[in-house]
Amino acid sequence: MENLSVCVIHTGKTDVPETEAIPCALQERGIDCHRQPGPDTKVIIVCWTTRIAFEAVMEQLQQLGSADYKVIILSVHHTVSDILKWQLVQAGASDVIAWKDNDEAVIGLLLSRIKRWKLINDLIQSDLVQRTMIGESKNWKKFLGKVIEAAWFTNHHILLMGESGTGKEMTAGLIHALDQRKEKGELVLLDCTTIVPELSGSEFYGHEKGAFTNAIYTREGAFALANKGSLFLDELGELPLTLQAGLLRVIQEGTYKRVGSNTWNKTHFRLVCATNRNLKEEITKGNFREDLYFRVASAVLTLPPLQERREDIPELARYFLRQELKLVAAPEIDNTVMNYLVSRDYPGNVRELKQLIARIAMRYTGEGFISIGDIPEDELPDIQQLKQAWNQQHQSMQQSIRLAIASGKDLLKIKNDIAMLAMEIALEDCGGNLKLAARKLNVEVRTLQYIRKRNEVS
Ligand SMILES: Nc1ncnc2c1ncn2[C@@H]1O[C@H](COP(=O)(O)OP(=O)(O)OP(=O)(O)O)[C@@H](O)[C@H]1O
């Protein structure tokens, strides 16, 4: 299997002969299997034998946990209690499986998991996703993985939750694009805030000519237009109760009548709904039908707010700048502006960032880089607040540097420690890939190799 390497390791120092069978069995089935995690490692199988304490496995998980791969714990020749399994999953394991020698069922399970993760990973890297769904942060990639899992592998209805401007409508577009149905219909968008109940949901059902005043023509509604395709209902929480009952019927039966008609028509679509309301709360308040909730929420996917993926702001900013200026390569954004963009709050999430970049682009003269002069005047931050934010952000750094000076480290040593730490963080973010980490830190790969070597020596 190309570009997906699996690493089989053992907790503790001892090599365990009985688990040698696992890498061999995987290799035989075409999986690239290693004993050390490398840049392409996407799955780590941790063999846990009876000789090793549970705490040691937890510790190992913690060490592995932050990078971009899946971890499977294989308990070798012993059973693990339910409570320990849950603890392992909470600590970051993707699965906990028991293994006995030549256990074909386990090998089959591992293979199918690995294949699925590879496909998800390939789709995340595909043009379809990369061109529109901008972001490389762990939170964003985790979300994309879940979208792909629900959209590609199932026909389930999907509920998208998340604050305004996080990208719910955009995600609905991706879900439709990923849909595997052969004769795929259209993606139909309907905003529930615009539906007028007095018209008995003509937007949904369509109507016959003369069904009501102003019904001059026969008109198809969203249920007909979305047939064989997807229906995206934005702001589902705003749908009036009367129309909720109708929607439930159509989802269950797959049939509907146009307003003013007695004929039943068939329709079949994937429903993607979006809301920034807590629908479970709305159910307790009596504003939303519980039975409808369980119908539309076969898969619930929550979009991360921008503040939980601030690492993506620079890439998003450059992307929107390219879009606004209609350029293939956007002008550089200088450090002061970028620091401001990354540290500012965005209650309106990505939409707010997009609007801010549009305003910056309006001021840009077309020459050189984006500088502080391109930030609109009403955007200029409160200096006190900025100082406070800077101090908060750098407090722990200041403390560490004070400690380093007090313990006799000179400037060179401190610089070296910081460089090492930056390298470790970038490597962690890039799943251990040195090339990507170097690009992130805007240095050559050999600079990172040098830093690493220097630290091995000192
Ligand atoms: N990851 C992203 N990459 C590129 N553009 C994005 C991303 N996330 C959001 N956007 C852009 O931000 C804007 C807002 O996104 P969208 O309309 O999908 O949000 P929403 O969650 O549906 O908002 P609302 O709840 O207010 O309807 C759109 O222009 C969208 O293209």
Image: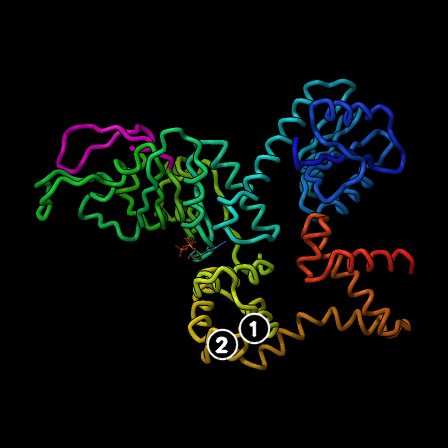
- Answer yes or no: disc 2 within 8 Å of ligand 1: no
Would you call the spot at circle 2 few (<14 residues within 10 Å), some (14-19), or many (20 or more)?
some
Q: Residue at x 72, y 57 (%)?
A: 425
Question: Relative to 385, is 284 on the left or the right?
Answer: left
Alpha carbon separation for disc pair 1 and 2: 9 Å
Residue 247 on image: x %, y %: 30, 38
Q: Is residue 250 or residue 5 the one in the foreground?
A: 5
**Residue 53 magenta-highlighted:** no
The amino acid on which the numbered mark 2 sits, given as a three-letter code, is Asp
Residue 271 on image: x %, y %: 37, 38
Residue 266 on image: x %, y %: 26, 28
Check if mark 1's residue and mark 2's residue have beta carbons within 8 Å: yes
Q: Residue at x 75, y 24 (%)?
A: 99
**What residue is pinned by disc 1?**
337
Q: Is residue 40 above or below residue 378?
A: above
Look at the image and name its color scheme.
rainbow
Residue 149 on image: x %, y %: 53, 36
Q: Quadrant of residue 251?
A: top left
The label shown at residue 415 is none
Question: Relative to 57, is 254 on the left or the right?
Answer: left
Q: Is residue 306 above or below residue 85?
A: below
Question: Relative to 176, is 380 on the left or the right?
Answer: right
> Where are the magenta residues, as a range?
249-270
**What residue is pinned by disc 2?**
374
